[in-house]
Image (cartoon, grey):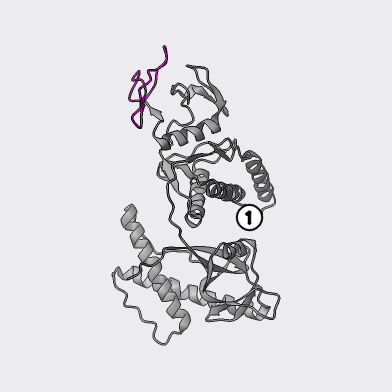
């Protein structure tokens, strides 16, 4: 029996342009489905039973779809409760969400018809991201989700299916370091733009909105857009050069306490975005433990937090000078190849991840564990 080819699914958001009558009908159906969804979820959580005994006989299509979605919510909540050990309670706020289908539009200036199930057919226009995904070999599925954005407008999420090529570790690595002073730094010498101007603009914007009593915007949105573009550039560059990307471990970053201007979420977002894009592009991605990569000298291996002063790195032992972000990316690459030093204890010298002649610490250098 032939094996099924692995695929990846990516979601894209389209703006819907219904006339007032269709918009009112669509909103009414979404509200009805949410009411049923909350009721079914509440009833099942109140009984505490594993099996569902709720029936939707004679209640209509909206209730049937709400019951199906409620089962998914409860199942996901219970799995999360088992994994985290925390109790799963009935959700108090559920989104306006419904199902639909996608049809190509002909004889009109719109690109698609989104048919709400049940509900009206609403026109939608494509955009550059979706068109690019289809050009890269993606296939648009016929299913969609109808939702409402933060501004109260109807939107549709459509899904594109990509074949997943086999990614091979080439052994030729590019280390990637994410920070504030430079959004992305790579071991090949690339230095991205700083995140500080983006953070400053967003902070001023939020302050003005707060002064006027408006809803605050998220600080992360602009940074995420910038990091998404950097991720696209990195994956495209690695694919052209047949290289493997090396990132900081998402597990290690998730255990870090929030500190600095943005904490660890930017690194985790960049890593997840690179993983998503690399999966479809066939680029291998490797994760390494990121400890001490920005305070360890790449020449003599001496490790000391005082080696670093902002973006300037100056080894207190051998005097080697480098840019901190570039140094960190090169050390990330070295750790992927197995030649990054780490200490075993005070005055223990240097031990390498792979067989390597140990190099003693320079005279007067003390390596702290």
Magenta: main secondary structure equals loop
**Residue pushed farthest top?**
363
Taking the magenta stretch, the answer to whether it contains residue 16 is no
Q: Is residue 133 left or right of residue 9?
A: right
In the image, which residues are magenta?
344-369
Tell me the residue that label 1 is attached to. Answer: 215
Q: Residue 32: give x, y in percent of width and height.
A: 51, 77
Residue shown at the point (34%, 69%) measured from the top left? 46
Between 84 and 142, the one nearer to me in the picture: 142
Occupied quadrant, residue 340: top left
Q: Is residue 212 left or right of residue 305?
A: right
Q: Residue 273: give x, y in percent of width and height.
A: 51, 51
Could one spot residue 149 in this view of the protein?
no
Between 203 and 171, the one nearer to me in the picture: 171
Residue 61 lies, with reference to residue 245, above or below; the image says below
Q: Residue 141: give x, y in percent of width and height.
A: 51, 72
Between 282 and 345, the one nearer to me in the picture: 282
Occupied quadrant, residue 291: top left
**Secondary-structure class at tag 1:** loop
């Amino acid at each position: 029996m032939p094996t099924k080819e692995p695929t990846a699914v990516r979601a894209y958001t389209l703006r819907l342009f219904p006339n007032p009558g269709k918009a009112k009908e669509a909103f009414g159906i979404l509200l009805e489905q949410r009411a049923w969804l909350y009721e079914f979820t509440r009833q099942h959580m109140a009984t505490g039973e594993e099996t569902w005994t709720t029936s939707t006989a004679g209640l209509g299509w909206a209730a049937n779809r709400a019951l199906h979605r409620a089962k998914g919510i409860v199942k996901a909540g219970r799995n999360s409760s088992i994994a985290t050990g925390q109790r799963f309670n009935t959700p108090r706020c559920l989104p306006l969400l419904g199902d639909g289908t996608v049809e190509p539009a002909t004889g009109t200036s719109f690109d698609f018809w989104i048919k709400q199930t049940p509900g009206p057919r609403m026109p939608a226009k494509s955009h550059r991201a979706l068109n690019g995904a289809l050009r890269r070999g993606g296939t648009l599925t016929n299913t969609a989700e109808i939702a409402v954005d933060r501004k109260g407008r109807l939107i549709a999420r459509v899904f594109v299916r990509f074949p997943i090529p086999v990614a091979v570790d080439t052994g030729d690595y590019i280390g990637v370091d994410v920070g504030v002073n430079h959004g992305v730094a790579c071991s090949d010498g690339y230095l991205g733009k700083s995140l500080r101007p983006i953070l400053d603009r967003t902070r001023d914007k939020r302050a003005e909105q707060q002064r006027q009593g408006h809803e605050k915007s998220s600080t992360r949105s602009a940074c995420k857009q910038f990091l998404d573009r950097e991720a696209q550039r990195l994956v495209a560059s690695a694919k052209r050069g047949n290289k493997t990307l090396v990132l900081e471990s998402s597990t290690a970053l998730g255990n870090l306490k929030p500190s600095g201007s943005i904490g660890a979420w930017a690194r985790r977002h960049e890593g997840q975005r690179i993983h998503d894009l690399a999966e479809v592009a066939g680029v291998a991605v490797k994760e390494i433990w990121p400890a001490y990569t920005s305070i360890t000298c790449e020449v003599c291996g001496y490790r000391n937090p005082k080696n670093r002063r902002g973006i300037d790195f100056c080894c207190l032992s051998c005097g080697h000078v480098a840019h901190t972000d570039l140094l960190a990316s090169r050390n990330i690459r070295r750790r992927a190849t197995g030649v990054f030093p780490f200490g075993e204890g005070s005055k223990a010298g240097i031990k390498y991840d792979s067989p390597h002649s140990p190099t003693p610490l320079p005279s007067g250098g003390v390596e702290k564990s």
